[in-house]
Image (spheres, rainbow, N blue to C red):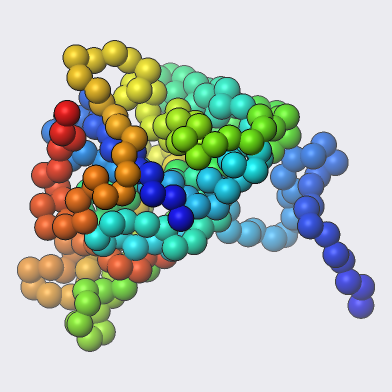
Amino acid sequence: MTTYRVIYEDPDHPEEPAMVLVPSDNWLADAMAGKLPPISVYWELQDDEQKAIDEGRHSTFKHDHNKWEKQFTAPRIGKLTEEEAMEYLVMKDIPRRVWAVEYNRPMFKIVKTEQVPSDRQFRNAWEMTQ
Amino acid sequence: MSTIKAQVVENTTGGATTLTDLYPCKAWANFNGTGTVYIFSSGNVSSLTDNSTGKFTLNLSASTSTTHQSVSGSAQGASGVSYDGAPVGRNTSISKSTSSVAIYAARLIGTSTCGISFDSADTAVMVVA
């Protein structure tokens, strides 16, 4: 079981509590076995969906089948280390505005589980410490 | 009767198969939303985002082709409370997406807790699309 987590804040929603990304062990095993497609496959799908949102046609949006099928058919990128897999996961599952834009402070951190509070009593007030 | 033995089933171009008149689950997860959140087991889920109390997002390993997924789930109720349980539904405060499904669990009982999102030690969700 992985001991990594990713804590991040969404710059578009600064009032929201910090979020914690929990990797799936099954996915991580695939990543370390070299079963993932290039990250560009996912970005292409995200770009197409964002374009549909921007153009107000998201409710009827359907992915181009050839692009969608690349998730399964694109040549695999080879085995990743656990750390490389975490970086891949950040770029896949966290909004690009969080990690691809430079802010006056970091918006995400890859941490160990022990750095994430286990007491969730004040969960809705969590903030990312610097 | 014939027996089919195969480790991987693909379509003719190496992609995902479409099984005529079968509508299988496209993703599922069973996770602990209390303490240090972790995924017990899952299928087609790359990660789980802990958004806030009782609110989580399943990030899919492979996106669905449209945003019109059906989401269903249930969660164990509060510890020590008999006949407690919680439905799990789509969190409509987060926009639909083909690559993720935002969900929440809310308790069914208690005058001050009914309808309020809460963290469950055993939450199960499945997505059909």
The quarter of the picture where residue B72 lies is bottom left
- In this view of the protein, which residue sits in the foreground, B77 or A129? A129
Q: Is residue A91 above or below residue B5?
A: above
Horizontal relation, residue A99 to residue B46: left or right: left
Residue A110: image x %, image y %?
Answer: 34, 35
Position of A99 compared to B26: left or right? left
Q: Residue at x 79, y 39 (%)?
A: B14
Q: Measured along the vertical axis of the image, is residue B69 above or below residue A108?
A: below
Q: Is residue A72 left or right of residue A85?
A: right
Tell me what residue is drawn at x 12 percent, y 68 percent: B113
x 30%, y 32%: residue? A109
Report x, y in % for residue B27. 53, 54
Toward which corner of the image does residue A6 lie, by quadrant?
Answer: top left
Q: Where residue A84 sits: x, y (%)?
A: 50, 32
Of residues A7 and B103, the one drawn nearer to the viewer in this rendering: A7
Q: Quadrant of the N terminus of chain B?
A: bottom right
- Tell me the residue at 30%/60% (across/down): B33
Where, by quadrant of the figure, is residue A9 drawn? top left
